[in-house]
Amino acid sequence: MPVPDDVVAWINRHFRDMDRNTAIGLLEDAVDERDAVVEPRLLRCAVIGSRGDIDRLTELVEELRIDSEDVILSGEYESRAGNLVRVRDLNLPLEDV
């Protein structure tokens, strides 16, 4: 599946030059637990959750094959005062978060 333009732009801003093509390739090949193509929201969650680290992105893409809930939590939620709070809606295209 082609990676959405907003995700590619985020990768270009946050990943090291040498990791960018690998990051895009990981997302192009990402599948869920049913071996289906991953929706853009989950790709966004994975890149945000990776925080620009290729090893973390690899882990999150592998996690998509098992259970996407952890990937969603890593991208859309933060812990505040011991509670998980949704801080972004990644159904929408990425801005510079």
Image (tube, helix red, strand yellow):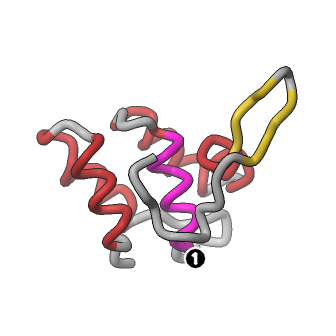
In this image, 90 relative to 66: left or right?
Answer: left
- Report the number of discs: 1
Name the one closer to the observer, 78 or 21.
Answer: 78
Q: Amino acid at mark 1?
A: Ala
- Which residue is label 1 attached to? 36
Magenta span covers which residues?
39-49
Q: Is residue 42 magenta?
A: yes
Q: Is residue 30 magenta?
A: no
Q: Residue at x 46, y 39 (%)?
A: 50
Q: Residue at x 29, y 41 (%)?
A: 14
Vertical comparison of 34 with 80: above or below: below
In this image, 36 relative to 53: left or right?
Answer: right
Res 19 visible: yes
Q: Quadrant of residue 79?
A: top right
Question: Magenta region, mostly helix, strand or loop?
Answer: helix
Q: Quadrant of residue 41?
A: bottom right
Residue 80, image x, y percentages:
78, 27
Q: Residue at x 64, y 53 (%)?
A: 88
Q: Residue at x 65, y 61 (%)?
A: 89
In this image, 77 relative to 51: left or right?
Answer: right
Name the one closer to the observer, 68 or 95.
Answer: 95
Res 38 visible: no
Q: Quadrant of residue 64?
A: bottom right
Q: Quadrant of the N terminus?
A: bottom left
Mark 1: which secondary structure?
A: loop
Vertical comparison of 58 with 9: above or below: above
In this image, 65 relative to 94: left or right?
Answer: right
Label 1 environment density (alpha carbons within 10 Å; few <14, some 14–19, many ≥20): few
Residue 27, image x, y percentages:
39, 61
Q: Residue furthest left?
A: 18
